[in-house]
Image (spheres, helix red, strand yellow):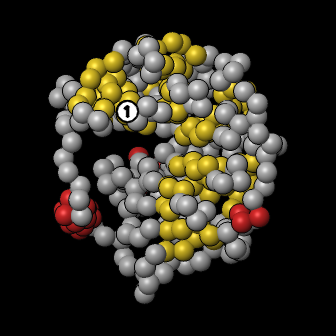
Amino acid sequence: MKRKPYQKSPRLEAGRWISQRRGNPAPVASLGVLLLVSLVLARQAFAAGFTNASPMLNPRVLHTATLLQNGKVLVAGGIITNRPALRTSSAELYDPATGLWTATAPMSVARINHTATLLPNGRVLVAGGSAERAALRSAELYDPTTGTWTNASSLNTNRSFATATLLPDGRVLVAGGEPDSHPLRASAELYDPIKDIWIRTGAMKTARSGHTATALSDGRVLVTGGSGMIGSILDSAELFTPSNGNWAAVGPLNQSRWRHTATFLPNGQVLVGQCSLINCTPRANRTRQLCCAMGNYLWLAATKTPMHPLY
């Protein structure tokens, strides 16, 4: 595979965060209010045209779902929810043409909180995660044409709750995550699918897990939030540059967030949304910090000065 040269985008020289609502900052809502809001939004979504799909073969959480080049969706791993604490290696495929789920070959290892990345060759790279409270180094590849898994080279470092981002040259950046116990990972590594090797690259400025990593139009990767040391929730953000393997801190989020979402928009902005309502605050800060404050934020390419939330 010929790698594309790295090109810097003039639109993302610096950034700031803004909210999508106006007015004074609202107080952090209680869990009950957040659940109510979620129910209302769900009802609105269905009213707007959402319909129920066929249920999966196995109810599961903490799995991955990957859109394949053939239009099907690969779901792998997780915990089978009707069998408490049962991690699974099983995988299944959703076919939007028929609306049905079918079983496919299982992974070699039962894992949760892993990453799954669609590669340019159509295969899916699954890496890391945890099995029976032990963070994993192992990685494997799913081939949709044969419906089988093969072992890939192992990560240099065992990690769970990490991120995996496909770069323009076909490599995969895996960053951060948790080992078997603290401290968290700030390290990062690159997977080369042609050579089937992992190569260490520059470490992030801040160790984190449960963060997001978003590929930008200029090839860089924006990392936001996550859980930091001693259970703190982070508002920091940083950018990875593939051409030199370096990370640079950028303006912080307006709200600390963990296990949230970050979506690249067609106009070059990144939309950062709510975090998980369940187990929203990790470990020691469960009663003191909430990352589920209402409001979505945008990364803007204009200035290094962060904006305060505007509701």
Q: Nearer the viewer, residue 207 or 262?
A: 262
Report which quarter residue 252 is drawn in.
Answer: bottom right
Report which quarter residue 145 is drawn in.
Answer: top left
* Residue 158 appears anywhere in the view: no
Number of labels in the image equals 1
- Tell whether 99 sits left or right of 62: left
Give the vertical position of 110 relative to 55 (above or below). Answer: above
Give the vertical position of 215 relative to 122 (above or below). Answer: below
Report which quarter residue 224 is drawn in.
Answer: bottom right
Instruction: Please tell me how crowded label 1 is: few (under 14), some (14-19), or many (20+) other residues with Cα within 10 Å.
Output: some
Badge 1 is on which residue?
72
List x then y, in percent, for residue 36.
20, 65
Element class at badge 1: loop
* Residue 14 appears anywhere in the view: yes
List x then y, in percent, for residue 290.
39, 61
Q: Nearer the viewer, residue 186 or 63?
A: 63
- Amino acid at circle 1: Lys
> Residue, x 40% and y 35% (percent of image)?
71
List x then y, in percent, for residue 10.
77, 64
Residue at the farthest bottom position: 23
